[in-house]
Image (cartoon, helix red, strand yellow):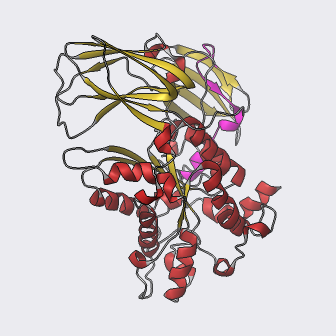
Amino acid sequence: MRTIACMRRLLPWIALTVLACASRQPTAPTTLRPADVEVEVRGLANVQRTLRLLETSTETRRNRVRVLFYGQSITESAWSRQLEAALRARYPYADLEIENRSIGGHASQLLIKAAESDLYPYYPDLMILHVVGAHDKYDDLIRRVRERTTTEVLHQTDHVFDPAELDEPSDPATLGPNSGNWSAFMNHAFLPSLVERYQTALCDQRAAWKHYLRENRLEPAALLSDEVHINAAGDDLMAALVGRCLRAAPELGPSPAEQWVTTHEAFFEGDTLKLSFEGNRVDVIMHQGAPAGARVEVRIDGKLPSEHPELYGFARAHAKECGKWPPVFALGSEAPLLLEVWTLSVERVSADIFAFSLVGSKTGEDGSGRSDQRFVSRSGRVVIEPEDWNLTYALKLAGSEPPPARVAITFRVEPHFVDTLAGVPGDPAHERSVTVAQGLSNGPHVLELRATGGMAVRALRTYRPPLTPTAE
């Protein structure tokens, strides 16, 4: 009942026109500029590892920083591209890798399934997050980030799209999921609670948005292109607010992530290095300009990384008719995976039920099934749960009308490992960091490197997520 009630409130967010190219509405002249709006960020200390890496990047030592924008259609809007450009301009010497893997129309109930292929394997240093949907699934998403990654999280309260929200209650003691005011509960009680529980940072753009509207005597619609989505003026404001929350504050001390990510000097005994570590990921940082003939063989717990089944994973599934929307989520397996491409040949049985056959590029024909039944392929390499089919909804969002009778869905298995490293000439100012294993059990491991043809390794970096995975 709780989820049904909240989804009635959220229907505009997940409307079919999740990122429609709506015309930009002109707005009245403003007296308070977006760049001058003050915004509170709770838990600012919890994103300081990323900010330290950015701030300490120089022309001769360029830190690599990976940033992910994640959410729905609001995060797909132009503000995220504006903020990306601002970060690149602010930190010209940082080697920034920035992606936006948001999926419009997918509330937290669906986004948490997409995260299996889109979020955790990407393993960013910083995630900028805005999500609508059931609060328990939002909580699950953040918890899993803490179980599977060392990612720092800056999440956002909602912008204002209803005039009634300008005077909403804000005392968290009076707000609950069944209090009758879902938006107030989410923005003033639930989202702030995550800061302490999961050591995240929260950009309170909602309060700043209200201040901006009042000071400029604007209605919420002045910053919207429809009932929910923001227009060009809204993009400008949101980019400015989130950007102001990303500020270095060394006086706050080290971020918790500084304890989760550790860089070790590389000490070889002869041609061999051994490192005992705890965590689920290890990177090898190579000497730029190492001899071209230099080679480094990698072992984890006495085996090649490729011999660890947990270091293989499924990428997002695709179908041409579904556009960017995934037709199926959270693919699993009961047997070790191979690096291959899979094809599901799907045929409609009824409005919401599909029959399919499965073929792997290496495994070959691997069984058939129906979308309303649990499927385990003959090899055990592909498992699909009935609740993880998203084909009908994906076709609807993509505008595939009438829905096709047949669809080909493809997905591939990706390696989260490297067995052998090679010396590569390069600019020593840029860090060449290679992830040799990601997805290990979050516990004790032994890394062993054996070098030939010259010393190519400068340092090692290990990642230990702070939480132990819970049984689902």
Q: Is residue 79 among what the camera can see?
A: yes
* Residue 317, percent from left and from top: 52, 35
Task: Relative to 235, say whether 119 is above or below.
Answer: above
* Residue 106, percent from left and from top: 60, 51
In this picture, residue 306 sits left or right of residue 55: right
Task: Relative to 372, say whether 112 is above or below.
Answer: below
Query: Which residue is at 63% across, 14% downward?
Result: 378
* Residue 58, percent from left and from top: 23, 50
Instruction: Return the residue nearer the eye: 142 or 391.
Output: 142
Q: Is residue 327 among what the camera can see?
A: no
Does the magenta portion include 354?
no
Q: How many marks?
A: 0
In this picture, which residue range is highlighted in magenta?
377-399
Instruction: Return the residue nearer the eye: 390 or 302.
Output: 302
Does the magenta portion include 395?
yes
Image quarter of the C terminus: top right
* Residue 349, percent from left and from top: 69, 34
